[in-house]
C-alpha cells in the first residue's frame, strides 16, 4: 500500500473526500508533493502560516529549545523561559488589561478555558454566542458555535447558551445580568468573512460593561495581522475582557491561548486550586517557535496594510476586504468544489468555508507578494 492508501486506512478521517495531497516539503508560500510538483499555498494551513512555512528564525528557535528541554512538568508549575518570554512579548503588544496569558494546546482549548473562566469570575452560567460563528470542536466550544447542523448530532451540549443574530442591535437585548459571557469573532471567518459594523461591536462592548458580562473575542483566525491590523479588535476601537488566540500563535507548532487581566485569571488558582490544568499546554518548543514567529511578524514588516491590485474575476464574486484575506463566492458548493479541485491540478491550494460552502477561501501567508497573489487569483478566475 502507498502512503495515501495507508492514510485512508489507518489515519482517522474527518470527511469522505479529503484533499489527500501528499506534501513532502514546505517553504515560504510554496508546498511540494512527492512527485516534485510545486503548489502555491493560498490558505496557509487555514491562517496558521502567517509568516510563511518554515521561517529560518522559527526553525532556529525550535532547534535551540530542543537542545535545552522539551516537556518537563505540567503547565503552570515550573518557570519555563519560552512561556514567560512569549507571554511577556504578547502582553507588551496588547492593551494593559490583557496582561496574563494562559497557554493551551489548541484554539478549542482556549475557548474552553475562557468559558470556564467566565463562569468562575461572574458566578453566572448563561452564555451568548452568534449564528454562523465557529469556536472549536470540543463540547464546550461546540455548544457555542452558531450552526445547528454541526451541533445537533452531539447533544446534549452545555445548557444556557443562546445564539443571536450577528450584527443585529435587537439581539443585544438578550445580554443581561444573568449572562456570564458573550463570545464572538471580530470577523466571522467561517461564515465567509462577515464584518459587523463598528457601532454594533461598540454596542456589544457597552452592553457587556453595563451588565457585568465578560466580552470574549475569538481572534484565533483574525489575529496576527490577518486583517491588516495586529489584532482585529483594533478595527472596532474596543478591548475584550478575554482574548482567544491560536493558529498563527505557534508559528506552525500547536499552541492556543486565552488572555485576560491577572485579577480575573487568578480565579483559577483558588477554590478550587488547579481550576484549569493541562499537561502539555504551553509546550516549551511550541512557545519558543511562537515567540520567534511573533518577533518575525513584528520586525520584518510582514503585516500588509495596503490593498493589492486584484484581477477581475467573472466566474464568481470576488470579495477581498483585507490585503491578504478574501474569498470568491460561487453559485453552489458543487461549483466551488470543482474550482478547488481544478486549482489543485493547476498547483494552487485553496479550500471552502464551514458555514459558506459555496465560497472559496483565500488566506495565504501574509508574506505572499502582491504579484504572487494577483497571478494566483488570475488562475483561479480562469477556471471555467
Ligand atoms: N475559533 C476559530 C475562529 C477558528 O477558526 C478555529 C479553528 N478553525 C477555532 C476556534 C478552533 O481552533 P482549533 O482547531 O485549534 O481547536
Image (tube, rainbow, N blue to C red):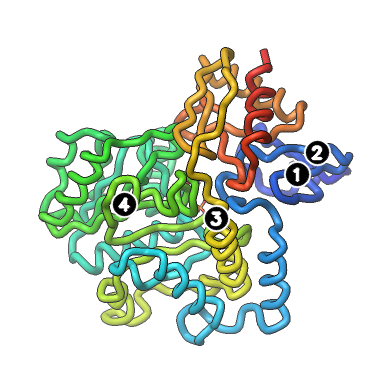
**Label 2, on which residue?**
38
Question: N-terminal of the two: label 2 or label 3?
Answer: 2
> Label 4 to label 1, Cα distance in Å?
40 Å
CA gap, disc 2 and disc 4: 45 Å
Crowding around mark 2 (Cα neighbors within 10 Å: few <14, some 14 to 19, many 20+) is some
SS label for mark 3: helix
- Looking at marks 4 and 1 on the same chain, the residue that comes earlier in the sequence is marked by 1
Whichever of labels 3 and 1 marks the residue nearer the N terminus, that label is 1
Q: Nearer the viewer, residue 126 or 255?
A: 255
**Is disc 4 in contact with disc 3, using a CB cutoff of under 8 Å?**
no
Which residue corresponds to mark 1? 31
Q: Look at the numbered disc 1 and give the secondary structure of its residue.
A: strand
Quadrant into which the C terminus falls: top right
Q: Is residue 101 above or below residue 23?
A: below
Residue that badge 4 annotates: 158
Of the residues tagged 4 and 1, which is closer to the observer?
Answer: 1
266 left or right, relative to 327: left
Nearest-to-viewer mark from 4 and 3 = 3
Q: Is the Cβ of the residue at disc 1 closer than 8 Å to that at disc 2?
A: yes
- Using the numbered discs, state the Cα–Cα distance from disc 1 to disc 2 in whole angstroms: 6 Å
Q: Quadrant of residue 379?
A: top right
Amino acid at each position: 500500500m502507498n502512503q495515501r492508501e495507508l492514510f485512508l486506512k489507518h489515519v482517522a478521517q474527518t470527511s469522505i473526500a479529503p484533499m489527500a495531497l501528499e506534501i513532502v516539503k514546505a517553504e515560504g508560500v510554496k508546498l511540494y508533493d512527492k512527485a516534485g510538483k510545486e503548489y502555491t499555498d493560498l490558505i496557509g494551513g487555514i491562517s496558521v502560516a502567517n509568516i510563511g512555512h518554515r521561517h529560518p528564525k522559527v526553525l532556529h528557535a525550535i532547534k535551540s529549545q530542543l537542545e535545552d528541554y522539551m516537556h518537563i512538568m505540567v503547565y503552570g508549575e515550573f518557570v519555563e523561559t519560552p512561556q514567560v518570554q512569549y507571554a511577556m512579548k504578547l502582553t507588551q503588544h496588547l492593551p494593559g488589561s490583557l496582561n496574563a496569558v494562559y497557554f493551551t494546546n489548541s484554539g478549542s482549548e482556549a475557548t474552553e478555558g475562557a468559558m470556564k473562566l467566565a463562569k468562575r469570575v461572574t458566578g453566572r452560567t448563561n452564555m451568548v454566542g452568534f449564528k454562523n460563528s465557529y469556536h472549536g470542536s470540543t463540547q464546550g466550544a461546540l455548544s457555542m458555535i452558531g450552526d445547528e447542523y454541526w451541533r445537533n448530532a452531539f447533544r446534549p451540549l452545555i445548557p444556557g447558551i443562546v445564539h443571536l443574530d450577528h450584527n443585529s442591535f435587537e439581539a443585544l437585548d438578550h445580554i443581561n445580568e444573568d449572562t456570564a459571557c458573550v463570545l464572538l469573532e471580530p470577523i466571522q471567518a467561517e461564515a465567509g468573512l462577515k464584518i459587523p459594523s463598528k457601532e454594533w461591536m461598540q454596542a456589544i462592548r457597552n452592553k457587556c460593561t453595563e451588565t457585568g458580562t465578560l466580552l470574549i473575542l475569538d481572534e484565533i483566525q483574525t489575529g496576527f495581522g490577518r486583517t491588516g491590523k495586529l489584532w482585529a479588535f483594533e478595527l472596532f476601537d474596543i478591548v475584550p475582557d478575554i482574548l482567544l488566540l491560536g493558529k498563527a500563535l505557534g508559528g506552525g507548532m500547536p499552541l492556543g491561548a486565552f488572555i485576560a487581566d491577572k485579577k480575573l485569571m487568578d480565579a483559577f488558582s483558588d477554590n478550587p486550586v488547579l481550576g484549569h490544568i493541562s499537561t502539555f499546554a504551553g509546550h516549551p518548543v511550541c512557545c519558543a517557535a511562537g515567540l520567534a514567529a511573533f518577533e518575525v511578524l513584528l520586525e520584518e514588516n510582514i503585516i500588509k496594510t495596503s490593498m493589492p491590485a486584484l484581477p477581475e474575476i467573472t466566474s464568481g464574486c470576488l470579495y477581498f476586504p483585507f490585503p491578504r484575506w478574501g474569498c470568491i463566492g460561487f453559485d453552489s458548493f458543487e461549483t466551488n468544489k470543482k474550482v478547488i479541485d481544478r486549482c489543485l491540478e493547476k498547483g494552487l491550494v485553496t479550500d471552502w468555508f464551514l458555514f459558506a460552502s459555496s465560497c472559496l477561501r483565500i488566506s495565504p501567508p501574509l508574506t505572499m507578494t502582491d504579484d504572487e497573489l494577483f497571478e494566483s487569483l488570475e488562475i483561479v478566475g480562469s477556471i471555467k
